[in-house]
Amino acid sequence: MQAAQTTVVATDLDGTLLRSDLTVSAYTRTVLRRLDETGVRHVIVTGRPASGCGPVFRALGYRGLAVCGQGAQVYDVDRDLLLTHTELDRAAAQAVVARLNRRVGRLHLAVVTSGPLGEFVIAPGFSRGDERELSPFRLVPNEDLWSRPIDKVLLRHDALSDSELAAEALARCGPGLRVVHAGLGIVELLPTSFDKATGLSQVCAVLGATPSDVVAFGDMPNDVPMLQWAGHAVAMANGHPELKAVADEIAPSNDDDGVAVVLDRLLHETLPEPSTASATG
């Protein structure tokens, strides 16, 4: 990669830009500010719905467009406006869940409702004390999960690993549905019509950027399409092996500010030193 050509830096949030306690370090914020000063755009590309990203946007002073909901949503932060979103076929998703229940036993479920006020709706048994990552959320009986339009379904199982559950779900998906492994304890059913790469490509088209202009950071298999699309792909040290296999380099972990470490290096490699010449009279 010719880092000097970079005009867009795309980052996942959880497990990538955010530390494990969901904070952004002062060092990372400083590097992102320096990035902005050079004219390079930072684009957040996350599995979270736009409605759950507000605290991160505010902490970063984030402006412009963001890709949310695994690519289903393009959100204008400045105008608080959801520009695109894609609903899930509820009947098809329910059929997959029924087939999975027969195959592997009881699943624990949650959904994300559609639209700009989308929320996590959680059925009993899904929560493992990680509500801080599922915001806003509410608890309902299983039968009420399907009462409103939804963008995705989240699956958990008491005995199967995430990878095993994802494989079982994929084997039982019908046309129009796909499975992504988005994080620890997060296996999702989504429409096939988008992914993080398609969402990022929409934003880059607005910014006038091509794949070769983009450096992308991620940590989980749901980030694979984005890293494969970008000109330079960076996986986190804490990332999933599937993602590391497609990466051009491995950054330090999210808790070691890996995104900032790599960007700091690229800034030093590609930017000219400030002029030390002074005017003489």
Image: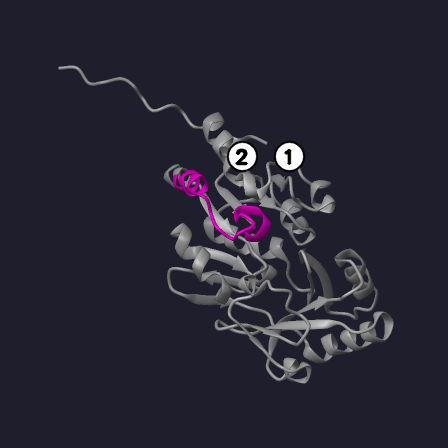
Answer whether labels 2 and 1 touch (C-beta < 8 Å): yes
Give the side of residue 41 with respect to residue 163, left or right. left
Give the side of residue 209 with respect to residue 39, left or right. right
Q: In which quarter of the image is the N terminus?
A: top right
| Quarter occupied by residue 45 | bottom right
Q: Quadrant of the C terminus?
A: top left
- Residue 278, position in %: x, y? 22, 18
- 122, 70: nearer the viewer: 122
Q: Which of marks 2 and 1 is nearer the N terminus?
A: 1
Residue 270 lies, with reference to residue 77, above or below; the image says: above
Residue 187 lies, with reference to residue 97, above or below; the image says: above
- Is residue 171 part of the magenta span, yes or no? no
Residue under the point 44% across and 59% down: 55
Magenta stretch, residue numbers: 12-33
| Quarter occupied by residue 166 | bottom right
Q: Is mark 2 on a helix, strand or loop?
A: helix
Three-letter amino acid code at disc 1? Glu
Three-letter amino acid code at disc 2? Val
State the residue position of label 1: 249
Residue under the point 76% across and 66% down: 157
Instruction: Give the farthest residue toward the left.
Output: 281
Mark 2, Cα crowd under 10 Å, few <14 / some 14-19 / many 20+, is some
State the residue position of label 2: 262
| Quarter occupied by residue 198 | bottom right
Give the side of residue 96 with respect to residue 27, left or right. right
Residue under the point 59% across and 59% down: 47
- Residue 173, position in %: x, y? 79, 68
Q: What element carries label 1?
A: strand
